[in-house]
Image (cartoon, helix red, strand yellow):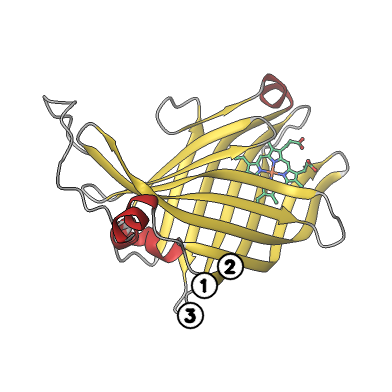
Amino acid sequence: MLELPDDIFSEPEDADPDTLANLGPLRRLAGTFEGQKGIDVSPKAEGPQRKMFTERIDLQPIDHQLNGPQLFYGLRYHTHILAPDEDSTFHDQVGYWLWEPATGLVLQTLTIPRGQVAIAAGHASADAKSLVLTAKRGETAYGICSTTFLEQAFRTDSYRITVNFHDDGSWSYVLETMLLVRGRAEPFLHRDENRLVKVADPVPNPLMRLLKA
Ligand code: HEM
């Protein structure tokens, strides 16, 4: 963690405007990716449901962000998931991946339209081959916040994402979301995985596009 400085207002004036050059381990996530062989295990009344899915995820660089002295480079993402035999959305998610070069802090924010938000955190080196980020219900810093219905019916206690980068430029992830389903004695492991292949390069961040024009 960055030690809390006495001056929490002053911002660095020499931050590089080129986000793609400063994404550390997130550089390999930048662009548009697709994966056809996702696997979801989710809770249903009859018990766990295992289903294949297809995914498209767009991760685009944003201009660097400053919290006073704290500097982040990052990507804004949107993931859209379909089950092979259905036209309606199976899962939709938006958020940011952020990297703090000074500390190696990696963050993923998640917004899921069932009324759920989370910030997961981890640490990695710039050349990391994998990332592990976690969020926990009840934490005020890197926590999970849900609707009253979800709190009562599908309490989400923890979230973990593991990302592995592959030599061919693809990457894969495993999501492990622990749910306490009302009326069930044991927690339920809601698990998702997929491998994603790049279909388009990222577009440079807005400030870089402006500087180039
Ligand atoms: C690839 C990612 C994911 C997919 C494909 C997915 C898919 C699903 C599906 C199919 C269900 C069953 C209920 C339904 O049909 O609506 C479900 C339930 C649920 N998911 Fe996910 N999910 C994903 C990630 C997540 C994540 C990251 C979280 C939270 C951090 C989450 C939280 C929940 C909760 C709380 C439920 C229970 C609510 C309910 O059944 O109405 N999911 N998910």
Above-or-below relation of 56 to 201: above
Residue most extreme to the left? 6
- Label 1 within 8 A of ligand 1 by Cβ: no
User: For the residue labelled by badge 3, is the local secondary structure a helix, a strand or a loop?
Assistant: loop
- Report how far apart the C-alphas of labels 3 and 1 lie in the structure: 6 Å
Residue drawn where x is 64% and y is 60% of the image: 56
Q: Is residue 22 left or right of residue 87?
A: left
Question: Which x, y percent locates residue 191?
Answer: 65, 51
Residue ranking furthest to the bottom: 168
Q: Which residue is mark 2?
A: 196
Residue at coordinates 41% horizontally, 63% vertically from top-left? 130
For the residue with label 3, is its CB less than 8 Å from the closest atom of ligand 1? no
Give the residue type at disc 2: Leu
Q: Disc 3 residue type?
A: Asp
Q: Earlier in the sequence, mark 2 or mark 1?
A: 1
Q: Look at the picture and state if 182 lies above or below 172.
A: above
Residue 26 on image: x %, y %: 39, 58
- The answer to whether residue 90 is left or right of residue 56 is right
Q: Residue at x 13, y 29 (%)?
A: 5
In the drawing, what numbered circle is on residue 170? 1
Q: Which mark is residue 168?
A: 3
Please rate how many residues cluster around mark 3, counting C-alpha atoms within 10 Å: few if below 14, some from 14 to 19, many from 20: few
* Quarter of the render that holds ligand 1: top right
In percent of the image, x 65 and y 54: which residue is there? Answer: 192
Q: Quadrant of the C terminus?
A: bottom left
Q: Residues within 10 Å of mark 2 (few under 14, many from 20)?
A: many
